[in-house]
Amino acid sequence: MADSLIRPVDTQRRALRRIGPQARPAHLASTGDGHPADAVDGHEAEEILRRTRASVDPELRVALDSLPGPMRRVALYHFGWQHADGSPATGGAGKALRPALVLAAAAALGGPAARDGALRAAVAVELVHNFTLLHDDVMDRDATRRHRATAWTVFGDADAILAGDALQALALGLFAQDPHPASSAAAARLADCVVELCAGQHADTALEGRGPTEVGLGEVLDMAEAKTGALLGCACAIGALYAGACAPDVDALDAFGREAGLAFQLIDDVIGIWGDPRRTGKPAGADLAARKKSLPVVAALTSGTPAAEALAALYERPGDEEDLEGTALAVERAGGRDWAQAEAADRMARALQALSRALPEPESAEGLLALAEFVTRRTG
Amino acid sequence: MADSLIRPVDTQRRALRRIGPQARPAHLASTGDGHPADAVDGHEAEEILRRTRASVDPELRVALDSLPGPMRRVALYHFGWQHADGSPATGGAGKALRPALVLAAAAALGGPAARDGALRAAVAVELVHNFTLLHDDVMDRDATRRHRATAWTVFGDADAILAGDALQALALGLFAQDPHPASSAAAARLADCVVELCAGQHADTALEGRGPTEVGLGEVLDMAEAKTGALLGCACAIGALYAGACAPDVDALDAFGREAGLAFQLIDDVIGIWGDPRRTGKPAGADLAARKKSLPVVAALTSGTPAAEALAALYERPGDEEDLEGTALAVERAGGRDWAQAEAADRMARALQALSRALPEPESAEGLLALAEFVTRRTG
């Protein structure tokens, strides 16, 4: 599965490389995220994410440490830096994909100086992402995140809601204090994105409350774009703004992130059904047991095949551990798995097309390409 | 009660007037909120609030209309502009005290042009206030606000949380799009204020969960300052920023709003116990029945009097309609009512002292003074 998905990215990279090698500005002689070329092939994304955490975490800690005690406690727990009792913890802060996209986009369009100047913006985007996670977990009653108990299960709904509110304020406050000429435009873009994320979360909740035959594929794709694509697109657009890019390039970077975000969500949904439980940390078929209307499932339900009818009948009943293999098979027979993989490849191709509008020169796009590969290469 | 509370304001106004009459700049020859002097004595505040609604509402509607459908529906319901079914409604949008303070502060320090320039900022402050109301009602499970069912009771917790999140984003987004030179400083100040409001709401929830003898008066005052004073202070400070005021004047306006906000809360708590149900719209003694640890109650509980012990014993038991008069009497005997009225007068005196630092000339402060009088003159 993963191989069939990364092919378009590699093809595009080769295609982009065929355009070159062109004379490359000295400030871009790097791995594409503005750092000296020391990343190893295949581990490029991991290296970029590691470097992002190293740059972003100190600034993020300063921001979180500025919070009053009760909100700080919830936030540090949520980010995996404290246990519930307030003692120090390590790990669990997430992949830092969104700040990595901010920094990689800034570097791709403006070089290392732009990357360094976008650090506060990267922190703001990570704060917004985590504010939405805190609130989504309350609304969805999700009990586990990043292999740990969610904040609301530990501190209660009120403190999880308040910590999320405070993180949004911190994020937009960071832009307000940032003298960078792009900070206001970036803040306006991020504020719009928050509204879109809210609309996406609303749509998700509303879709889950409807019957299996009452959901269209188009609206589930729209929901996934609002809930996942919007912030990945916004992260890339903000990086472009901090690089001083022109409006069409900023929009191209937004489109790149949005389409890559949809590919990411499609793969995530495939993994949610067929992923290896040892790698996902979730029981096999957990999404099916919860009767989630994920993208492959809705594609299957709306396929007009006999398997779709069987799947709809299964989905009308509450989830049952024993029928999960049969349900997964019905999704596959109705074409849900093939569709999701083809759609992810298509979205990734569109992402790369958008990227090449702003970055016709392949080397400067390498950081962003590595991150795009990373999010679609996962096999759970 | 009301008379004893407004006295310090009138005394201060007379004191401020004794300093004058000085030559008054032409742009301030108005009622103090930047409009021609057409307000009638005693109805000044009502007139300012009415004019504020007339200026703010169209901008507020534009902002809310920019929201995606589901969030717009909840927001328009919450602001009293739509019924639950989406049909138009009128009234119930609240007093607009906070935007009135923004505009009055801008006018006081910069005249009508500054007032006009601060309109977007006034809308942003009103949006933040309403975002916190939406979330507080979810957390506190309050079923009624402004004589209507709260948003979460109509649309569910998730949509009320999301609408609140979206209103915060709208508010900070308005500043990001505002080319006014003060917009970034104002946004930073409002973001800090949101964090303080969250801390205040957390403290409130935590205090309500504790026993009647486990709460100190200082911490309840701190909570009230964070929960109520902070945003009134921030509104005044933002108005000053939009008038181009120097930092000490901005801080003086913040102090004015904070102290007036505490006076406001003290009077609100007095009304919550002894207010006329026909005017409050709530049953007599509702706060006592809910065993709320309001400021007069905590002052009584910590008074060290025999009545304090009797009150603590009453408060250990669940509320009982029949004992409400006795409970109110215990609060009064333990000095809670007298303390609250004296404290409110003291806070208002401090507010006026802070105001006179920034506005030694009395006429220019008239709009702010009228609003301060208004919030403490209420008798429920």
Image (cartoon, coloured by chain):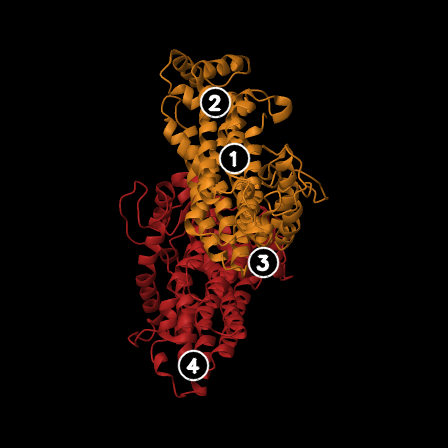
Chain colours: A orange, B red
Q: CA distance from mark 1 to mark 4?
A: 75 Å
Q: Is residue B177 above or below residue B89?
A: below
Where is mark 1, residue-wise?
A: A18
Foreground mark, 2 or 3, reads 2
Q: Earlier in the sequence, mark 1 or mark 2?
A: 1
Q: Residue at x 42, y 76 (%)?
A: B365
Where is mark 4, residue-wise?
A: B362
**Label 1 environment density (alpha carbons within 10 Å; few <14, some 14–19, many ≥20):** few
Q: Earlier in the sequence, mark 4 or mark 3?
A: 3
Frontmost residue, A240 versus A156: A240
Chain identifier of the residue bearing label 2 in the image: A
> Looking at this rendering, what residue extends furthest in the right direction?
A87
Foreground mark, 3 or 1, reads 1
Q: CA distance from mark 3 to mark 1?
A: 69 Å
Q: Is residue B373 visible?
A: no
Frontmost residue, A302 versus A205: A302
Q: CA distance from mark 2 to mark 3?
A: 47 Å
Where is mark 3, residue-wise?
A: B220
